[in-house]
Image (spheres, coloured by chain):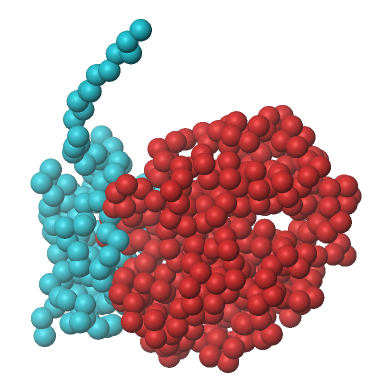
Amino acid sequence: MKKVAIVGGGASKCGRREASWRDLVQEAGKAMFENVGNISPKDVDSLIVGAAQPERFVFQAHVTPMVAECLGITPRKVAARTELMCASGQAAIRYAWACVGSGMADIAVVFGVEKMYMPDMTEAQTNMTCVLDREWDGVNGLSAPPFFAMTAQRHMLEFGTTKEQMALVSAKNHHYSTMNPAAHFQKEVTVEDVLKSIVISPPLNLFDCSSITDGAAGVILVPAEDAKKYTDTPMYIVGTGQASVGNVINNLANITEWVPLKMAVQETLRTANITRDEIDIAELHDCFTISEIMEYEAFGWCEKGSGGKFIENGEPHIGGKVAVNPRGGLLGCGHPLGATGILQALDIFQQFRGEVPQGRHVKGAEVAVAHNLSGAANVHSIIAYSRDLK
Amino acid sequence: MTVEFEKIKRQNMIKLPYMLDFYPLQDAKFTRIDRFFQNLKERKLTTTKCKACGKVLWPPRIMCPECFSENLEWINLGVDGELYAFTEMKLGAPLGFVEDVPFCIGLVKIGGLLISARIDGAKYEDLKIGDKVTLKIIELEDDRIFYRFCKVKE
Ligand SMILES: [Zn+2]
């Protein structure tokens, strides 16, 4: 398999946007092509679109040709769409990587988009409740917030994790997103703000939860050997891991230890030929504050159950053991499902190039991972990126 | 040239369609595990167990994912459960459940399984992990049926 590079990308502003699904596609597409001056839409031979639920949110299926049409792309090698709920965007990058690496595609656009604000938000909540097994879990009202609330309740019981420790995750990520103009939220949030915010599903308050967000993003993949034709500072895809265990509640490996994440981490380190201590930046899936705490543990940066202490000690801040979510995370940036994995990749790309504001720049970073979980945390997906080709 | 203009009328409200309804289709026209729902009508919570490898399967199935045997039997899970975790839906309920907010959701240990369920008969503040809960059956207006649990009064 050929080595593969990302040579550029762009994104729409994320948030509660007064814009349609198609508007978001065109905003991000224009930004992406402007970022890579010497690739025109007509040069692109392949397009893979990450989109979680356009059938529900905008009542539109078969979205890949629509994105192609919006951006003047005429795919002639690969055209496909990926759905892996919250990891849909990352799944699109993985497949485009495989296509370019295998020679099936030469210049591939990976695009992610989700328009989640609807005139009646009950409809949006309904969409989000068919993610877990609809007939056996969703039927009980089990969408993401109650599921992660019960995960947090068990983690607090078994390991003594506190609401204050969880709130520290939200405060950290909102702090970084104040320095990210593309983020949904640009206001500092204190631990007290989190604890005082309205209760969504106890023990989770509003600021423990990532938001419903509109957004789109795209990146362009080419064989590594061609990358310098397009930019002096490409980013290389160097490894990946993914695992899925069970789906309905009864068949999950464990509620308070994410076994598939541990599997995906091992596979990522193996394929990228790196150790966890070499990771400078980790864009982790902080859909809820408890998620990020459990991810510190599964990546092995701290012991099982001590994720709360890890953030209390400042370890996941820039300058600590590993910079976790210097983009602002899902908590600060919002979570436009199909776009999220691509927004993470794009921010790492800009981190390596030194194009992000000082306060959230991880200086000298060479290796990064982007992680997404989906469903009842039964699926975990990771891609490792490198500034240099080793 | 005048451009024709007409204001048209459309039916504004539709009844909750089955594919936006969280409750499963239950009769034999739409599922091969209709027996599960017949058993619920008889106040029994059941599932399938594989006679070839012994695995208790949840949800009930027509084939064992562990050994691919179709030789399954229906077993009764009983009525007594224990609360493993719980929370309350306060905001963000989907269509069909908005009227019920706030309501409690739990993970219940029963018959060697861990299943999610609505928890009736108690406020969030009244529940604790380890509480005994007991089976409750609900019936929808269209005769479809489902299970919940209730806190056992001490
Ligand atoms: Zn079997």
**Residue visible at 66% across and 48% down in the picture:** A31
**Residue visible at 62% across and 82% down in the picture:** A317
Lateral position of residue A222 relative to residue A165, left or right: right
| Residue at the extreme front of the image, as rendered | B1
| Residue at the extreme top of the image, as rendered | B1
x, y (%) of residue A15?
A: 47, 57
User: Between A306 and A169, which is closer to the camera in this rendering?
Assistant: A169
Residue B127 can be seen in this image: yes
Q: How many marks?
A: 0
Lateral position of residue A192 relative to residue A373, left or right: left
**Residue visible at 17% across and 51% down in the picture:** B145
Q: Is residue A359 above or below residue A268?
A: below
User: Between A204 and A266, which is closer to the camera in this rendering?
Assistant: A204
Q: Is residue A63 above or below residue B46?
A: above
Q: Which chain is cyan?
A: B
Q: Which chain is red?
A: A
Q: Is residue A304 above or below residue B49?
A: below
x, y (%) of residue A27?
A: 58, 45
Lateral position of residue A62 relative to residue A366, left or right: left
**Residue visible at 58% across and 92% down in the picture:** A313
User: Between A14 and B43, which is closer to the camera in this rendering?
Assistant: A14
x, y (%) of residue A144?
A: 39, 63
x, y (%) of residue A164?
A: 42, 87
Residue A149 can be seen in this image: no
